């Protein structure tokens, strides 16, 4: 718009509509990991896709089992189970991933490496698993 002195001004009647958060999903929703394994990334999706504030926070229910950083990357710490939760800043909506961390077997040895048996003879083989604290 121009006034009589030739000055130009503009204005807008448009308003910015805030789109509220209605929920959040987390993929995957379960993880089975091993102690010392490669960190695993979780993906949180805020609904609707055009929500105005898509900020989330991440938490672990047991940081002695697994931790999570601000990008949703899960790092194992010890054996056990925990929940990793993504929470929206707006609306406090949550989604959870159940995490199970095991200490995997790295080696199995037998008490006998070579044994010759006569017909109908038996021998007892004893397996030793490493590490000693392997989950299974």
Image (cartoon, rainbow, N blue to C red):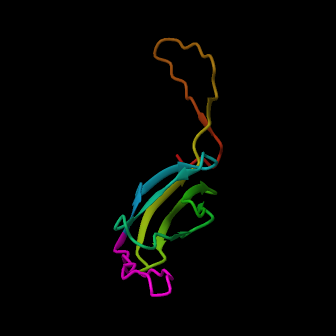
Looking at the magenta stretch, what is its main secondary structure? Answer: loop
Q: Is residue 22 magenta?
A: yes
Q: Quadrant of the N terminus?
A: bottom left
Q: Nearer the viewer, residue 6 or 72?
A: 6
Which segment did they paint magenta? 1-23
- Residue 8: % across, % down: 48, 80
Residue 40, position as x, y percentages in the image: 54, 50
- Residue 9, magenta (yes or no): yes
Q: Judge whether residue 79 can be spotted in this image.
A: no
Residue in the image at 59% along x and 33% along y: 126
Front-most of residues 40 and 61: 40
In terms of image quadrants, where is residue 69?
bottom right
Q: In the drawing, does residue 122 fall left or right of residue 91?
A: right
Residue 127 x, y percent position in the rendering: 58, 34
- Is residue 55 in sight in this rendering? yes
**Residue located 62% across and 37% down the image:** 106
Image coords of residue 130 (percent x, y): 64, 40
Q: Is residue 13 above or below residue 101?
A: below
Is residue 88 left or right of 128 when viewed as pictured? Answer: left
Could you tell me which residue is drawn at 51 percent across and 83 percent down? 7
Q: How many marks?
A: 0
Placement of 106 over or under 25, stated as above or below: above
Q: Nearer the viewer, residue 52 or 96?
A: 52
Q: Quadrant of residue 23?
A: bottom left
Residue at left offset 59%, top offset 50%: 39
Q: Nearer the viewer, residue 135 or 87?
A: 87
Residue sticking out furthest to the bottom: 4
């Amino acid at each position: 718009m121009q006034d009589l002195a030739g000055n130009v001004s503009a204005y807008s009647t448009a308003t910015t509509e805030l789109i509220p958060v209605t929920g959040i999903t987390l993929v995957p929703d379960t993880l089975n990991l091993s102690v010392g394994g490669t960190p695993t990334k979780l993906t949180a999706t805020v609904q609707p896709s055009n929500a105005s504030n898509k900020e989330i926070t991440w938490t672990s229910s047991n940081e002695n089992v697994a931790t999570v950083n601000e990008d949703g990357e899960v790092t194992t710490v010890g054996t056990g189970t925990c929940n990793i939760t993504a929470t929206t800043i707006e609306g406090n909506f949550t989604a959870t991933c159940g995490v199970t961390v095991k200490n995997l077997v790295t080696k199995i040895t037998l008490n006998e490496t070579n044994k010759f048996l006569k017909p109908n003879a038996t021998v007892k083989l004893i397996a030793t698993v490493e590490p000693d604290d392997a989950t299974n």
